[in-house]
Amino acid sequence: MSRIAARFKTLAAEGRGALIPYLEAYDPDRATSLELLRAMPAAGADLIEVGMPFSDPSADGPVIQAAALRGLKAGATLVGVLDMVAEFRKEDDATPVILMGYVNPVESYGYERFCNDAAAAGVDGLILVDLPPEEGSVIAAPAQAAGLDIIRLVAPTTPDARLEYVLAHASGFVYYVSIVGITGTRSASAHDLASAIPRVRAATNLPIAIGFGVRTPEQAAQASSIADGAVVASALLATLAETLDAQGRATPQTLPRVLEQIGALAQAVRAAGQKPA
Amino acid sequence: MANPIEHGAAAAQSNSFRQQPDEHGHFGGRYGGRFVAETLMPLILELNEAYEAAKADPAFHRELVYYQTDYIGRPSPLWFARRMTEAFGGAKIYLKREELNHTGSHKLNNVMGQILLARRMGRTRIVAETGAGQHGVATATVCALFGMKCVIYMGATDVERQKPNVFRMRLLGAEVVPVTAGAGTLKDAMNEAMRDWVANVADTYMLIGTVAGPHPYPAMVRDFQSVIGEETKEQMRAAEGRLPDVVVAAIGGGSNAMGIFYPFLDDASVRLIGVEAAGHGLDSGKTAASIERGRPGVLHGNRTYLLQNADGQIDEAHSISAGLDYPGVGPEHSWLNDIGRAEYVGATDTEALDAFQLCTKLEGIIPALESAHAVAYAAKLAPTLPKDTLLVVNLSGRGDKDIFTVAEHLGVTL
Ligand SMILES: Cc1ncc(COP(=O)(O)O)c(C=O)c1O
């Protein structure tokens, strides 16, 4: 069983959803982001999304754009990102790591080579925001051969007929984009989610994580109990950005503040699981 | 190279070059496509259906012809540039006068088609990206004409160097949003316009200004611009009794070039030449020559030649001309390049500045700096060709918007 499937299975048995925090690789530098990655499981991360910085993140809001730029300035490359994951894997063989980014750097690296190298580094899944299933044939076979899940996004705008098509190309889990918009702008209401998730649930057996707009512990608790997991990105990156000095460098505040926030999110997610639905 | 993206390469089995793209929006099975986030995907599919329906509807064509004629002022003349011909001392030079269109460039051809489509689709709010501001002005113009809400994203650098157009757009009632991300040029404006669209899908139509973006935009914009080539064909037959031998056009995203090339694609005798902005020189690292100095990749919804580094990060383009300052190019040009049906060359900032002045002095026509790149290459090529060669330059826009930039480069304070 893949790490992703195993983790969702364990959490289901515990009766709670997953907290899936996001970090941007090399933000604000390689060492800090690697240290953050390593500390995330103990702080309460059940799965981790690692952002691969891209120069033109057209589906992201200002917070992730800025994080990607910091990562690139710090020298992020795909080789470097995979190397970070490999170092993380030396100490943690259980926490699933999902790489999230845009397709061009991966195409430039070469799809087959990338899938093989990512799997070897200990990556479990890929989310390529701008690679819809219509264009997904370039990566489907190499990902499958390497044992990587291709995690598909589903949006409120995805019609039922299309939902089936998209989910036929999904593995690992389904990422439900809870708002119509870019990352880190609006949030969906519990009511919206409660009516949206059953529609997705009816179309797949895969676990469902909710992302885009999950910011507070309350929202994470709600999302992870309505679905099977909550992805928190912009809220954490915003905190990280706040702790940087005037030159954009990490300070002694950086790790503790971000980890503390992950801790609070994790606590809420776990508490929500204790309550009977 | 083990090429992972040749899956559809055999799809283009036809002896016509005018059968692209395929139903997936791929040109030659490789370029183009639909690389957008899932939130946009249903909209792109809806747009495709709406465009196919409009294309098949004679009422839509009648409406478009009406606005082309009475509002844009088409057909635009094909002007025999006698003094330029004499000065170059070779091929006979004709200028396709797209600068005479309402709003001063070819941009309105496309914008008019798309606004009529947006109205058919019931959209009430338009977002667009702009570089030089010509597409923004054209878009703001039709929004004024039809009473629609208009938001234009423009790189902060471009806002600075194209002030007259920014003022025009605001006069026309558009909201102009300066984009500070990246280098603050066209690619950043495109990212921001896409972000706006993703967030406002219910009422908003994204009106892309060139033959790029996810399918169906490259094909649709080409179709709306093809009126340029169709007229040129007829006008040249009337003037010279035959087809032109060479057609030259500047390439930003490639819409004025596709518009004049497309009707000639199956006329093997017609040489088609796209002139990219070589900036400080093709090998200076400061260019916008995506085909000549880039390699294929994925940006803004399509696969095409891109200026990018070894890690697939997109490079900033450079050109004196804001309308050419883009690190990509329409996917159909990438395909035409690979199969050798069109040639792609460069003209530098300096060559464009010289051609700008030359065209102004010899023909009394102030060309846009974008179009001046095409004139610059024609000036190089024409003297090498026999005097009976017919060479058409697509004069895509007028240069009034550029006089500040040109003055600055000539050391003149206005
Ligand atoms: C006058 C003029 N010509 C050419 C261009 C380049 O665009 P395209 O290559 O799509 O024709 C522009 C873009 O702003 C323009 O304003």
Image (tube, coloured by chain):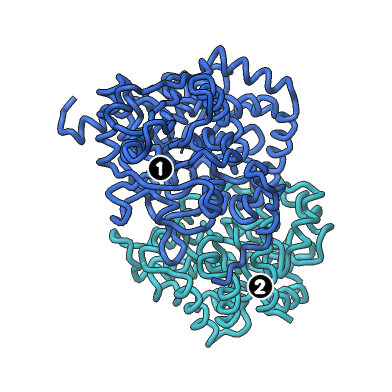
Q: Is residue B161 left or right of residue A42?
A: left
Q: Is residue B271 above or below residue B143?
A: below
Give the percent coordinates (x, y) of residue B244: 49, 32
- Mark 1 or 2: in front is 1
Indicate the quadrant containing the N terminus of chain B: top left, top right, bottom left or bottom right. Answer: bottom right
Q: How many C-alpha atoms fall within 10 Å of the one at disc 1: few (<14), some, or many (≥20)?
A: many
Q: Nearer the viewer, residue B83 or A208?
A: B83
Report, in whole angstroms, how far the alpha carbon at label 1 lies from the one at label 2. Answer: 40 Å
Residue of label 2: A143
Q: Is residue A28 left or right of residue A145?
A: left
Which kind of residue does numbered mark 2 sit on? Ala
Residue at image location 62% in from the left, 36% down from the top: B220
SS at mark 2 in the image: helix
Q: Nearer the viewer, residue B77 or B370?
A: B77
Q: Which mark is residue A141?
A: none
Q: Which chain is blue?
A: B
Give the percent coordinates (x, y) of residue B53: 75, 32
Q: Which chain is cyan?
A: A
Residue of label 1: B275
Q: Is residue A217 above or below residue B208?
A: below
Give the percent coordinates (x, y) of residue A146: 65, 78
Chain under callout 2: A
Number of marks in picture:
2
Chain under callout 1: B
| Marks 1 and 2 close (CB-CB < 8 Å) | no
Asked which quadrant contains residue B84, the reply is top left
